[in-house]
Structure formats: structure tokens, C-alpha cells
Amino acid sequence: PEGIRGYVGGGDIALQYPAYQSRNMKLSPFIGIGGVGMGPSEAEIKKYPELDDFKEFSAFNYLAGLDFKLNSWNKNINLSRDGGGYVGLRYTYYFPNYSRKNTLMDGNMHMVTLTFGGFGRPMKRDF
């Protein structure tokens, strides 16, 4: 039925390679494996028990994509060497391994994610 609330969730492990790095940005293609789940919420399944057939979890899927990070807070920090804060944009293409009980579950998925984060290294001090 129209207007059904649902969820999409997932987790993955990916290998990245920094294809381009500079003081201000970093561009990294990646590949990996993970899991993606999607389906109706528990409240919707209680209202419409037939939706229980669409509650699935892909235990294993492949993914590939491109990660773009922009050094946005401190221009004196080199993202490729020293760490620092960043804003990122990540495009991921998922190849889920659903059991395909329903034709609705056929296909792959595109996901664009806006990220905020940071990383650093401990300072070495000479006395």
C-alpha cells in the first residue's frame, strides 16, 4: 500500500586507495563487502501482516564507489599527511544478494552520503 514507512540500513568494510591527494582534498575509489537491509517497519507489519514477506536482510553484498573528502576547517593541516577535520561526499553502488522471493527486490542500489569527520596523529615532541 502507498505511504508505508520502512527502513534501509547497512554496514560495510571497504578498501580505499587514495588516487589523488592534496593539501585541500582527497579522492579515493573503493571496493568492499557488506550487508544491506531494507523493509517495512514493525508497526506497518502489525497493520499489514502480508508485508512480512518483504522484510529481508542481505547477509552479503558487494559494493564499489568513490569517496571525496574536502579539508574544510583548517587549511594549515595537510589532509594527506597530518589529519584534520573534513567534509566528505561518498557515492556507493551496492550489488545486494537478496533471495529474490519477490520481483520488487530485484536490482541494485545507488547511495550518496554526506559525511563529517576527522582524524589525527599523535604529536612527537623533542625536548
Image (cartoon, grey):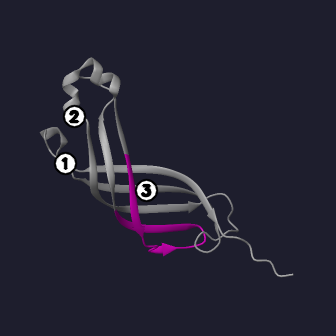
C-alpha span from label 1 to label 2: 15 Å
Q: Residues within 10 Å of mark 3 (few under 14, many from 20)?
A: some
* Residue 57 in view of the camera: yes
Which residue is at the far top?
A: 47
Magenta region: which residues?
10-32
The amino acid on which the numbered mark 2 sits, given as a three-letter code, is: Phe
Q: Give the residue drawn at x 27%, y 18%.
A: 47
Q: Which tag is nearer the camera, tag 1 or tag 3?
A: 1
Q: Residue at x 52, y 73 (%)?
A: 21
52 above or below 85?
A: above
Majority secondary structure of magenta residues: strand
Counting residues from the start of the chain, the first of labels 1 and 3 encountered is: 3
Residue shown at the point (25%, 23%) measured from the top left: 2
**Residue 28 falls in image quadrant:** bottom left
Q: Secondary structure at mark 2?
A: helix
Task: Please check the rendered image and state whether residue 22 is part of the magenta-colored stretch, yes or no.
Answer: yes
* Location of residue 44 in the rendering, given as x and y in whole percent from the top left corner: 30, 23
Q: What residue is shown with label 1? A: 107
Q: Sequence order check: which comes first, mark 1 or mark 2? A: 2
Location of mark 2 (residue)? 54
Is 9 rendered above or below residue 1? Answer: below
Dot 2, how many residues are within 10 Å of its Cα: few (below 14), some (14-19), or many (20+)? some
Q: Alpha carbon of mark 1 to alpha carbon of mark 3: how far?
A: 20 Å
Please say if 38 is above or below 43: below
Q: Which mark is residue 90?
A: 3
Q: Is residue 30 left or right of residue 78?
A: left
Camera sees residue 3: no
Amino acid found under the numbered disc labelled 1: Gly
